[in-house]
Amino acid sequence: MLIPASGTGQYLANSVKAIRFAARGCTNRPFYHIVVTEVKRDQVDPVIEQVGTYDPIPNEYNEKLCSLNFERIKHWIGNGARVSNPV
C-alpha cells in the first residue's frame, strides 16, 4: 500500500503526538521527512502528516537543504505535539 507524502491524516484524538524525523533514501544517500506521528508508533508506521524535509548531504553549492511548513508545525505544537531533540 502506498502512503501519500502528506500522510494518512488518521490518528487517535487523545494520543500524544511527536514531530520527528522519518528516515528515507538509501544507505549511502540519507534523506529525512519531518513528520507528525503518534509517540508510540514505529518509524515505519503511516504518519499523520509530513511537515517538512531535510537533506543532510551538501549540494553543489555546499548547502544542506531543509524545507518546513511553519503553519502546520505551529498548528501541531499548539495542539500539544512534542518536538524531538534532533528536529
Image (spheres, rainbow, N blue to C red):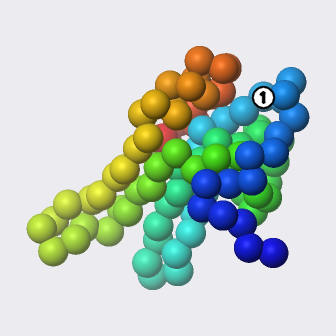
Mark 1 lies on residue: 16
Q: Residue at x 84, y 28 (%)?
A: 13
Please tell me whether mark 1 sits on a helix, a strand or a loop.
Answer: loop
The correct choice, above or below, for 19 with respect to 15 in the image is: below
What x and y, as percent, mark residue 66?
34, 52
The correct choice, above or below, for 23 with respect to 81 in the image is: below
Which residue is nearer to you in this view: 26 or 2?
Answer: 2
- Point out the image quarter for the N terminus: bottom right
Q: Residue at x 41, y 56 (%)?
A: 54
Q: Count the marks.
A: 1
Left or right, 60 with reference to 8: left
The correct choice, above or below, for 9 with respect to 81 in the image is: below
Q: Residue at x 61, y 54 (%)?
A: 6
What x and y, as percent, mark residue 80?
67, 20
The correct choice, above or below, for 27 with respect to 54 in the image is: below
Which residue is nearer to you in this view: 70 or 59?
Answer: 70
Does the rendering let one see residue 39? yes
- Crowding near pointer 1: few (<14 within 10 Å), some, many (20+)? some
Left or right, 22 with reference to 13: left
Does the rendering let one see residue 21? no
Quarter-of-image position of residue 65:
bottom left
What x and y, as percent, mark residue 50?
58, 50
Q: Identity of the amino acid at label 1?
A: Val
What x and y, as percent, mark residue 64?
27, 59
